[in-house]
Amino acid sequence: MIRINNLSYTYPDRTLALDGVDLSIEKGEFVALIGKNGCGKTTLVRHLNALLMPTSGSISVFGMDTTDTSNVWNIRQTVGMVFQNPQTQFVGTTLEEDVAFGPENLALPQNEIQERVDRSLREVDLLEYKTYSPKTLSGGQMQRAAIAGILAMEPQCIVLDEVTSMLDPQSRSNVLDTIAQLHQSGKTIIYVTQRIEEILPIADRIISMNNGRIEFVGTPKEYLASVESPIPAVTSLMRKLKAKGFDVNGNVFTVDDALLEITKATQVRDKNKTETSGNG
Amino acid sequence: MDELFLSYIHGDSILYRLDPRTKLVTLMVISILVLQTFTFPCLGVFIIFFILLAHLSGVSTGILIRSIKPMLIFFTFIFLMHLFLTKGTPIFQIGLVHPTFEGLTTGTIITARFVLLILFASLLTATTRPTMITNGIERLLRPLPLKRFGLSSFDIATMMSLSIRFVPVLLNTARQIRYAQISRCLDIRHNMFRGVSTTITPMIRESLQTADELAIAMESRCYQGNFRTSLFELKMRSADWVVLCGISGLAVLSYI
Ligand SMILES: Nc1ncnc2c1ncn2[C@@H]1O[C@H](COP(=O)(O)OP(=O)(O)OP(=O)(O)O)[C@@H](O)[C@H]1O
Ligand SMILES: [Mg+2]
C-alpha cells in the first residue's frame, strides 16, 4: 500500500530528477520499474523509505507519511532496501553478523536476533554459510545475504535497486529465484532493473520511466502490446519472424512460448503446403 | 599476507571462551607491566608467560610470531637507533659510528618490549572474534561520558568494526588501481612521487563513494548510532573473575 502523489524532487545542484510522479502500489504486488540511465528510478525508490524527502508532493507508505520525521524508523522497517553494490552494503565481518545488523539496530533481545538471523538465512538458502567472511562469498551470495539482512527486519515491502547488475548470469538467476519466492510468500516487491527480459515473466506490473516522469504503467502483456523498445531478444525475434510472413504471436517473451508458437506456425505452414500440392 | 596480521584464527580453548572484556583488561595490564620492565630477568618472565599462554590458547605459535613480520622494519629501526645513539663504552669504532654496550642493552630491552606487546596483542586478536573485541570495547567505554563529545560507545564500536571490514577492501582497491595503471603503461615503480599521487586521487574518490553508499545502506537498515543490542551478548563467567583477580594480584605484586 504505497501512494505517491504528484512527487517532484530536485537535487541540491538543481538537477530536476523527478517531475510530478503519481503512482499506487498495492500490497503483495510485484512491480518492476524500468527506464534508461539517469531517468530517476533510484531517486524515486529512495523516497519510499525516507532516504530522500520530496521537494513537493507526498508519499504515504502503509498509511505513514514519509515527511513526518517521527515515522522514519517505522517506515525503514516496513520498506527494506537492497542496493546495487554487494560490497558496500555488507557491514559485518561475517555473514551472520551482517544479517544481524538491522535487528541489532532495532535493539531486539539476543535470542530474537539469533532466531531472525537463522530464519532469514534459511529463506535465502545461505544458512550453511553463516560464519563465512565476505571475502569468501560470491557476488550473488552477497546479494542474497543483503536480502536476508532486510528480511531480518521483517518488512512488508522490499525494494531492490538494480541488484543483479553486477552479477554473472548464474548468480543473477539465483537471486531472481529468491525474489520470486519472497513474492510468493506475500511480500510486496519493487524491482528496479534495466533488463526487461528478466522481469516480464515474474512481474505483475511494469512501470516505465523517462526523464523523471512515468511513461507507462501496465501488465507485461499490455507493455509488449504498446511498447516498441526495450523488448526481450525473444520477442524481438518473434516480431521479425512475423514481419517475414510467419504466423506467430509477436508478444511472447519466454523461450518455451516462442517454441510453441514456432512449432504451431510450422505445422500450419506444412499443412497448407501439402494441401496446395495435393490440389495441384 | 596482510590478512594474517592480528587476525582471528578459528579454534577453541580456555582463551577463546573467556569474555573479551577480561582479555582486554588483562592485555592492558600486561602491556603496562611490560612497558615498565628494565631488566633481562623480568623480560624472561614475560617471555615464559607468553609461551605458557600461547600453549594454552591452542593457536600455533608460528602464526602468532608471524604477526611481528610487518613491524620488522620498525623494530630494527628502534634497535639500531638505541645501539648507535646511546652514549657509553663503544664496542668498536669506525669513523664517527660507534655502537655502545649500553646501547646494545637498552636497544634489546626496548625492542623486546615492543615485540612482546605485539605478541600479547596477537594472542587477543587470534582468540577473539573482531565483533567480540568491538563489543568488549563498547561495554568498557559505555560508562564514560562520551556524549559530551557528541559520540556514543556504540558509534565507536561501529566505526571500529567498519574499519576491520573495509580496510582490506580499500587495500584491494589500491592494488586494482595500481594494476590498471601499470596495464596502461604508467609504470609508477620508477617514479615514487608520481606513483603516490596517481594512486591517491582515485583512491580518495573511491573511498568517498564507498563511504557514501555504506552510509545510505546503514541508514536504510535503521542505524541510529545510539543504543543497540548484539547478536553476541557478553557474559562474565567464573573463569573470567578468576583471571581478573589473578591479573590484579600480579599487578599489585609487581609494585611491591
Ligand atoms: N546525488 C546527486 N546529486 C545530483 N544529481 C543527482 C544525484 N543523484 C542522481 N542525480 C541526477 O538525477 C537524475 C536521476 O538519477 P537517478 O540516479 O535517480 O537515475 P536512475 O534511473 O537510477 O539511473 P541509473 O539507471 O543510472 O541507476 C540523473 O540526471 C542524475 O544525474
Ligand atoms: Mg539507479
Image: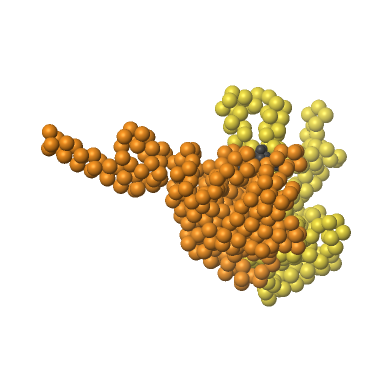
Chain colours: A orange, B yellow
Rendered position, B98 above or below B111 = above
The picture places residue B191, in percent across and down from the top left corner, at 68, 24
The image quadrant where one finds ligand 1 is top right
The picture places residue A277, in percent across and down from the top left corner, at 14, 35
Res A245 → quadrant? top left
Between B112 and B126, the residue placed more toward the observer is B126
- Position of the N terminus of chain A, as image quadrant, is bottom right
Image check: A243 left or right of A162? left
Image check: B63 left or right of A221? right
Between A210 and A80, the residue placed more toward the observer is A210
Q: Residue at x 78, y 34 (%)?
A: B92
Seen as rendered, the residue at the extreme front is A279
The picture places residue A183, in percent across and down from the top left corner, at 50, 59
Observer able to see residue B191:
yes
- Position of the C terminus of chain A, as image quadrant, is top left
Between A76 and A22, the residue placed more toward the observer is A22
The picture places residue B198, in percent across and down from the top left corner, at 68, 29
Q: Residue at x 75, y 52 (%)?
A: B113
Q: Residue at x 33, y 32 (%)?
A: A244
Q: Residue at x 68, y 55 (%)?
A: A59
Image check: A212 left or right of A169? right
Q: How many marks?
A: 0
Seen as rendered, the residue at the extreme bottom is B238
Observer able to see residue B68:
no
